[in-house]
Amino acid sequence: MSESQTTVATICQTLSENIAAGLYAAERRLPSERALSEQFSTTRITLRESLGQLEAQGLIYREVRRGWFISPPRLLYNPLQRSHFQAMAKDQGRLARTELIDACQMLASDGICQKLNLPAQSAVYRIRRLRYIDGRAVLYVEHYLNPQFFPAIIDADLTQSLTDLYFSRYGIKYGKVRFDMVPTRLPEEASSALKVAAGSPALFITRINRDLKDRIIDCDLEYWRYDALHIDVEVG
């Protein structure tokens, strides 16, 4: 093992032990890169390699222009359960919050039209939201809705659960759902909203929802921070 690799291993082990011991628990963040470089008598390049390894393990995460933070516990997520975001977080003792980025009516791309089973160049509602767990932004999501089922919905309070809003305002409940989950890199819109570097790893979930009459009503494009989610599925 080279001297550089030995230093990286030492830094990773030391910081992992410090995190486990709760040394940084008060502010949930690591000292600055300069301070860490001085502490370990190493270069920024070697330090960042060490931090990158800890980030890959999900122990820490970086926010652009803010520094390195201790990763909170991952949110358990079972796609077979129809619990909405706020309820899922509450059931796990976590605090959820939703921030509306924007909402508009627009001509959908060919891909979105296909997902919604609409003719090409159809108008849809697009709702973009940022979702937080315990004060940390973990999910950037774009919702595409068929306006036929949700007239004027973009005038409603869209920080609330869409599941609840669909039923209370339009009498619509979810039925079948189709999921597609793949690892990916964050596009610029998502990385900017989540305050992470463009191209950071993420879990991309596409969800196509039907109502109880088996009509496709909306689709969601979800970009999750890769270290925020734990997929947990039990099939009977």
Image (tube, rainbow, N blue to C red):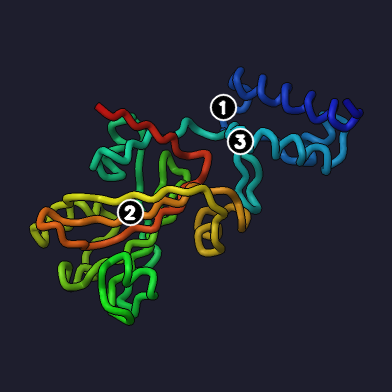
The earlier-in-sequence mark between 1 and 2 is 1
- Of discs 3 and 1, which sits in the foreground? 3
Q: Position of residue 77 (x, y in %)?
A: 36, 37
- Residue name at image x 26 percent, y 62 percent: 218
Q: Can you say which quadrant of the picture contains the C terminus?
A: top left
Residue 220 falls left or right of residue 150? right
- Residue name at image x 61 percent, y 56 percent: 199
Is 34 in front, or is 125? 125
Above or below 74: residue 138: below
What amino acid does circle 3 point to? Ile
Above or below 224: residue 14: above
Q: What is the CA distance from the residue labelled 2 to the residue labelled 3?
A: 28 Å
Tag 3's secondary structure?
A: strand
Residue 83: quarter of image: top left
The residue at which mark 3 appears reads as 60
Tag 1's secondary structure?
A: loop
Residue 226 falls left or right of residue 213? right
- Residue name at image x 34 percent, y 80 percent: 107
- Of discs 1 and 2, which sits in the foreground? 2
Tag 2's secondary structure?
A: strand
Q: What is the CA distance from the residue labelled 3 to the residue labelled 1?
A: 12 Å
Q: Position of residue 138 (x, y in %)?
A: 46, 46
Q: Position of residue 56 (x, y in %)?
A: 63, 37
